Image (cartoon, rainbow, N blue to C red):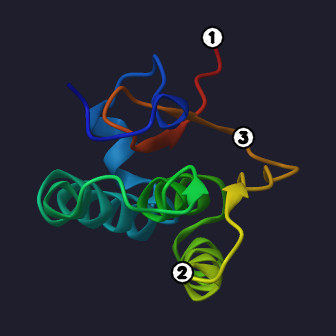
Amino acid sequence: MSVLPASATGPARFRVSDAVVLPLIPRNIGLLLLTGYRATISKLYGDVCRYYPSCSAYAVTAVQQHGLVRGSGRAISRIARCHPWAAGGEDDVPPHADFSYDLTSRGFVVPRRKD
């Protein structure tokens, strides 16, 4: 069972040539840390988030869509809204207008293939 939300995975494959794409390295390192958090610490808390998707799933999608800096900013904003008096509900990450990457089955972002 994957620790990533279903919307955060895709059919792309990670190739060695993808590793040299410098703008994607910080984004994928952030995704690695978030995946580790979701696999360990998030499991201990259980399902306590008032929002759907959970804050950590929101953070994964935000970093995938908007990059490490802007995605982290969106995640921090979401966490700040999550408190016991919040109404909660559905709160999806707004998609990036120019998202031109593919997602691997592990949630990493790779360049879109030209073929």
Point out the residue furthest to the bottom here: 80
Q: Mark 1 or mark 3, which has the lower sequence index? A: 3
The residue shown at (72%, 69%) is 87
Q: Measured from the top left, where is residue 43 in percent x and y?
A: 17, 54
Q: CA distance from mark 2 to mark 1?
A: 39 Å
Q: Amino acid at mark 2?
A: Ile
Residue at label 3?
100
Q: Measured from the top left, where is residue 37 in percent x and y?
A: 22, 64
Q: Mark 2 or mark 1, which has the lower sequence index? A: 2
Residue at label 2?
79
Mark 1 is surrounded, within 10 Å at the Cα level, by few (under 14), some (14 to 19) or many (20 or more) other residues, namely: few
The residue shown at (49%, 56%) is 54
Q: Mark 2 or mark 3, which has the lower sequence index? A: 2
Would you place residue 105 above or below residue 98 in this image?
A: above
The residue shown at (34%, 52%) is 47
The dot on residue 115 is 1
